[in-house]
Image: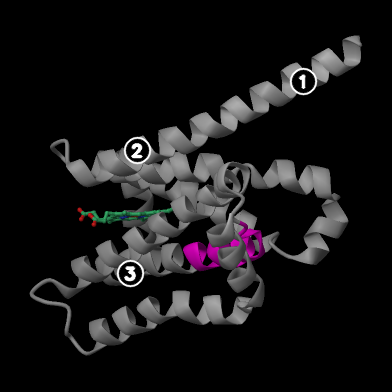
Amino acid sequence: MAVTKVINFLMRKLPNWVVYIILVLPAVYLTFALLGNQLGPDPIRTYQHKVGEFGLKLIIIGLFITPLRDLFNINFFKFRRCIGLMAFLYVCLHFLSYLVLDQSLNFNEVWKDIVKRPYITFGMISAGIMLFLSLTSNNLSVKILGPIYWKRLHQLVYLVSLGAVTHFLLLTKAWQIEPMIYFIILIGLLGYRALKAYQKRILNKKRNIS
Ligand code: HEM
């Protein structure tokens, strides 16, 4: 299709560094707005929510890359690492705003929160796995671990996305529409992956028989 060809051509031409800059801009803007006290009546909460949402959106966008290629032949693969790392940047800012501005670096209180509040537990698990995935998002790690094991390890991103959406679902007292939308999209994306893996297994079995 002509449209797909044009999109893929443009994506091939677009350098990775441009995408890094585009994705980092909201973080820079929000951080300066926070420092300049320009985020409304509750700047810390606004900042925390906005960077948290950016992080979650980027995690979900990253999960769209494979189905977009499989189903529509649109190839954003080149930007996968960039999107993952930028998602981690927003999650770091989100966590730091909680650690420094909410808890004033009181690690005792943070630990109490992790144990007492399930939404913090899920957030911490997701952020912890993301740290590990970000540290191994480089060519050297692919070389050391081998591409198959590395790929398997990076499938932990599904766990990250589930933990992050659960974090969002749990922190709202009443059922709210926004986290529910993320949840439904995520179920669709993970369902697609599960179906693909199942089809692959059946195909391999058939191949082994014949
Ligand atoms: C993958 C990791 C994470 C993602 C994607 C994420 C995302 C989010 C999102 C989308 C929100 C709601 C924003 C809104 O209401 O508009 C939120 C709220 C929040 N998150 Fe996270 N989060 C993560 C990890 C964490 C961690 C590790 C902590 C702290 C240990 C944390 C603490 C909070 C707090 C305190 C709130 C606000 C709760 C409130 O307003 O009462 N998050 N997060």
The residue carrying mark 3 is 97
Distance of label 1 from label 2 (alpha carbons): 30 Å
Distance of label 3 from label 2 (alpha carbons): 25 Å
Taking the magenta stretch, the answer to whether it contains residue 79 is yes
Highlighted magenta segment, given as a residue range: 75-88
The residue carrying mark 2 is 183
Which amino acid type corresponds to the residue marked 2 in the rendered image? Phe
The residue carrying mark 1 is 203
166 left or right of 203?
Answer: left
Question: Which of pointers 1 and 2 indicates the residue nearer the eye?
Answer: 1
Q: Can see residue 172?
A: no
Seen at 46% across and 79% down, the residue is: 22
- Counting from the top left corner in percent of width and height, residue 172 is at 19, 43
Above or below, 117 against 61 in this view is: above
**N-terminal of the two: label 1 or label 2?**
2
Q: How is the image coloured?
A: one colour
**N-terminal of the two: label 3 or label 2?**
3
- Residue count near mark 2 (Cα–Cα under 10 Å), binned few <14, some 14–19, many ≥20: some
Residue 184 occupies quadrant: top left
Q: Considering the numbered disc 3 on the image, is that residue within a helix, a strand or a loop?
A: helix
99 left or right of 73?
Answer: left
